[in-house]
Amino acid sequence: MQTHSLSLDILSDDEYFLIGIHTTLEDYKLAYLLNKNLGTSFSKLKEGLDFEKTSFSLFNYSNKKYDFEWFLLANSAKRENQTESNKLLLIAETKMYLIAEKKKVDFFIKISGSVQYSFVLETIDKIKKIDQVITSYSIDKNTLKSKDFLIF
């Protein structure tokens, strides 16, 4: 008799594609240009992605017709550090990264749901055509050490 078993990896909700974007744009401007060029409707979530007292901006776009969900998230955020020195209160900013091994990536797009890889490649080509975007490309999530930060 043949036995079939399922691994927990099959049941997990971490099936997604990841796109890296290099740009000097602010998050809201990039979301606007993506909406204009991709036909998406990214909207900023009130609460960002919070790690280690740092909040990374997060935008969301859901498409129930095609059963997928997109997230646009910043890879960096500034955190203020307060220190006291000789009765003076000093504030220093520290730049924090969501995915530290990809420090040169400014934003990620995470696409979850029923999406073909060819669709992802078409999306990357459309993003590259935006004048203010330096480049965009697919990222293999299995090569990331901090991919757990992308599960939300």
Image (cartoon, rainbow, N blue to C red):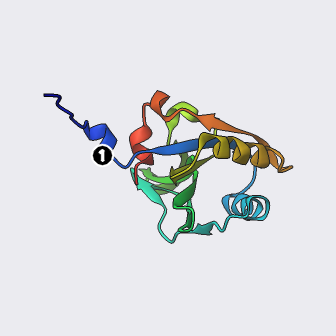
- For image coordinates 55% across by 57% down, the residue present is 71
* The N terminus, quarter of image: top left
Instruction: Identify residue type, mark 1.
Output: Leu
User: Relative to 51, is 17 above or below?
Assistant: above
Instruction: Answer with left or right where residue 62 lies relative to residue 54.
Output: right
- For image coordinates 17% across by 28% down, the residue present is 2
- For image coordinates 17% across by 31% down, the residue present is 3
Instruction: Answer with left or right where residue 136 lies relative to residue 147.
Output: right
Label 1 crowd (10 A; few <14 / some 14-19 / many >=20): few
Q: Secondary structure at mark 1?
A: helix
Q: Nearer the viewer, residue 97 or 135?
A: 135
Q: Nearer the viewer, residue 81 or 66?
A: 66
- For image coordinates 64% across by 44% down, the residue present is 120
According to the picture, the residue beneath numbered tag 1 turns out to be: 11
Instruction: Answer with left or right where residue 149 lies relative to residue 111.
Output: left
Give percent across and percent down for residue 50.
42, 57
Q: Nearer the viewer, residue 33 or 88?
A: 33
Give percent across and percent down for residue 107.
63, 47
